[in-house]
Image: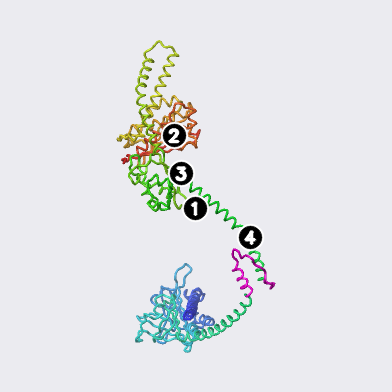
Amino acid sequence: MEQSVLSQLSSVATVSENMLDQTLQSHRERATLLSAHTDIRQLLRGGAERSPLARLLLLLQRDEPGLTGIEVYGPTGLLLDRAGEGAGLPDDARAVPQYRAVTDASGWRWYDVRTPIWGTNNEKIGYLTLRYNTRPVLDRLADIAPSLGSGSQVLIVRNGSGQLQLFRLTASAHGSYILSLGSVDGINDVTMPWTSSIAGKEGVARSVDEKGSDVLAAYRFLPTLGWGMALMIDRDEALTGVRTLAFTHASIGTLLLLLAAVLSWLLARQLTEPLRSLTERVQKLQPGAWAMHRIVHTGDEVEILESVLVDMANRLQTLYHSQEKEIRSRTEELRHQYALDRTILENIEYGVLTTDRSGHITGINRAGLKLLGEQEEHIVGAPIGEVMIICGHRGEVLKGVHPLLHCIKTGRAQQAPISARFNVCRSDDTLLPVLYTVSPFGSDKKIVGAVMVFQDVTEERKIDYLKSEFISLASHQLRTPLSALRWYTELLADSRKDLSDDQRSYVREMKKSVERMNALLSSLLRASRMESRNLTPDVSSIDVTALLHELRDDFEPLVHEAGLQYELVVPRHVVRLQTDPTLLRIVLQNLVGNAVKYSVKNSKKTILIELAEHASGITLTVRDDGLGIPFGEQKRIFQKFFRAKNVRKVDTDGNGLGLYITHTIIERLGGTITFKSIEDKGSVFTVRLPRAPKKRQ
């Protein structure tokens, strides 16, 4: 109720403020229009034979009875003519247009409106002052107060001469009187609403007046005059009528609510009886009790509803029996499939374990427990990193994120490369050679865990070692007779002058065969050393640009012989790198040699070798427009002895070890090698090497 009264006070205060501003604004506009009047212009020019203001004042007072005087001053402030009450030209006349309120002991009496008079050349040629009696304005403001109640009052606040002055408007006296707060004892004006209004604020509040009475007030700032205005009403008086009205409404409302409740209950009971009966019957519907018959015959919506429900019950009965049969059938199929899957899982030789999203093991099959030599209760619930400890060739624990955790994080399956020779460090400190595959699983693209399948490859690893040892031994044993054969072939080709052309041709073919066999043995020995991990890079500081220029000089005759072009793009400055120059040369020889070997002869195509330097190392790119690599075979390109089907038709002497050796060397040097290739379009191999290889553990 109090908020309602405050809201009404705020509305009335806004109306009062707007009325006062509009009145002052209209008087200012009147003064501006009057400054252009012909009589006033003639008076300023000195052409008026008699005072024109008296007649002008009489004419204006017909429309504005509050106008009491007119004054015209020259540009220097000299009074030229006056009609009615005079206001005088203050010292700050040059600040016009402005308003000036005039007060005396009885209150606010007049206000003056001043405006400059402008000449034809936009120069100031004089001043016009209009004096208005405040009674019409104050009467309108005073008449507003009784609409709020007999105890309401309107106060206009002025801060003058160091004292806060209140002009209390009274409708009975048709005027105002001044109450200077400086002469009132016991009043703390800081808590008064007019203090906020004179400070430029506006709002509503519960406060006290100068007598200490509890009031509700709305206050506004009057920017035109720089004064404040407050509308106040005694709180008890304001709320008495509202309380009485509220009590009356509440009493009537309570009686009406009670009456409506009784009538509603009686009517609802009568109307809902069929519905309640129908509800009870519907609630009894359940498997085995689907029967429902029509008993309502009211001819209205309830009968229609019952008909629909009876039909629905019959369809539910049919659907339930059908679904029950289908569920039994599907359950039996799932039970059979589960038994089959479990049997397969428990009897395969591969170890299978599952984890949740955090990497904790949730299950493992019998083969996995046997391979790890653990009990299920010791494994389930443990972190994957504590059970499946992935080790390297010599048992060193691999650093970085566990493959299964990396799979969960990235959402991509991962398979251990065959050449990596990973092991699992078991709890008894023995190593289990394994191949593993990890895959994420989940639903709706949300990963909830991962599955890891691992295989014991101990026998395969042994066979691979034996094969490598055999290749190494055989290569060493074959080098001695091969060297002798090569020496005798060269001697035969150089010393015998009496050989026929066919015989010389045979000797050349023998020499080529010996060279190819020697190259094959060198590649086999190099691959064998890499597999046995005995190859250690001899790191030194090298000039990569110089190495590339030397490589270009070595390959330039071979490139020209094949009818191709060779382009080398390197920085102008020296690019230095900490690496093994011999191994890096082998890498570049393999890549450039393949580019020449598998490009179309006499096609004038360009083999591009490009060197780029960056903050962390260098990038070497070898580009050709040759045969390319078939898409389906690209994932095997770095495997030992693998050759793509399209190159086997062009070159039958290859051994499939070049890219395998290249890939292994790059890994030993701490770098990476990638490629992009399109069949019959060419290939681009990219090698990235660090400034210095990291020390191997």
Which one is closest to the eye, mark 3 or mark 2?
3
User: Does 393 sit left or right of 23 as displayed?
Assistant: left
Element on which disc 4 rests: helix
Whole-Å distance between the Cαs marked 1 and 3?
26 Å
Q: Mark 3 points at which residue?
A: 348
Tag 3–tag 4 contact (CB < 8 Å): no
Q: Name the residue under label 4.
A: 318
Q: Mark 2 points at which residue?
A: 623
User: Does 651 sit left or right of 302 as displayed?
Assistant: left
User: Does 269 sit left or right of 378 as displayed?
Assistant: right
| Vertical side of 269 occupied by 468: above or below | above
Question: Of residues 16 and 270, which is closer to you in this image?
Answer: 270
Q: How many marks?
A: 4
The image's colour scheme reads rainbow
> What's the residue type where badge 2 is placed?
Arg
Prevailing secondary structure class for the magenta stretch in the rendered image: loop
Question: Of residues 588 and 623, which is closer to you in this image?
Answer: 588
Tell me the magenta residue range: 273-300
Query: What percent of the width, then of the height, locates residue 576?
Result: 32, 36
Q: Which numbered disc, 3 or 4, marks the residue that appears first in the sequence? A: 4
> What's the residue type where badge 3 is placed?
Ile
Element on which disc 1 rests: strand
Q: Name the residue under label 1.
A: 443
> What's the residue type where badge 4 is placed?
Thr
Which one is closest to the eye, mark 3 or mark 4?
3
